[in-house]
Amino acid sequence: MKTSPGTQRLFESIDGRYVLLSKAGVAVSFWIDEQNQVQLVQRLSDVDFKATGTQLKREGWKCVGPGMAYAWLLEDQE
């Protein structure tokens, strides 16, 4: 999957969890451990970009940018 900054958003919770949301309908939740390694929690497909982003904001998550450093998480993990 080819990603660009306009097609994804990275949300962060107050407790350091992240959700990377793509307009292609993919959402990936993860956290970063003490060794700065990404720990994948869940990967979902068929996610509504706008509705999910709006819901995350309502729940107190902060949009912290496009999250291009984590774009690799949106690729198929087969």
Image (cartoon, grey):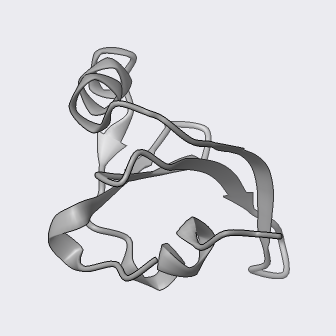
Please state the total of marks drawn on the protein image: 0
Q: Quadrant of residue 62?
A: top left
Rendered view: 64 above or below 43: below
* Along the line of sight, the residue nearer the viewer: 3 or 59: 3
Identify the image quadrant of the C terminus: bottom right
Task: Identify the residue at horizontal 57%, vertical 80% (top origin).
Answer: 72
Q: Position of residue 12 (x, y in %)?
A: 45, 47
Classify residue 43 as left or right of residue 46: right
Compared across the picture, whether 9 is left or right of 29 comes to left
Placement of 40 over or under 47, stated as above or below: below
- The residue at 59%/51% (across/down) is 28
Hey, which quadrant is residue 75 in on the image?
A: bottom right
Asked where in the image residue 10 lies, by quadrant, the reply is bottom left
Viewer-nearest residue: 42 or 1: 1
- Residue at the spot 41% in from the left edge and 45% down from the top edge: 25
Q: In the rendered image of this protein, does residue 12 appear above or below residue 50?
A: below
Instruction: Residue at 84%, 81% (x, y): give it.
Output: 35
Please provide percent x and percent y for residue 59. 39, 16
Q: Quick check: 8 left or right of 16?
A: left
Residue, far left: 6
Residue 1 vertical placement versus 16 (above, below): below
> Residue 15 placed where, x, y %?
61, 38
Q: State the image coordinates of residue 37 (x, y, percent, origin top left).
A: 79, 78
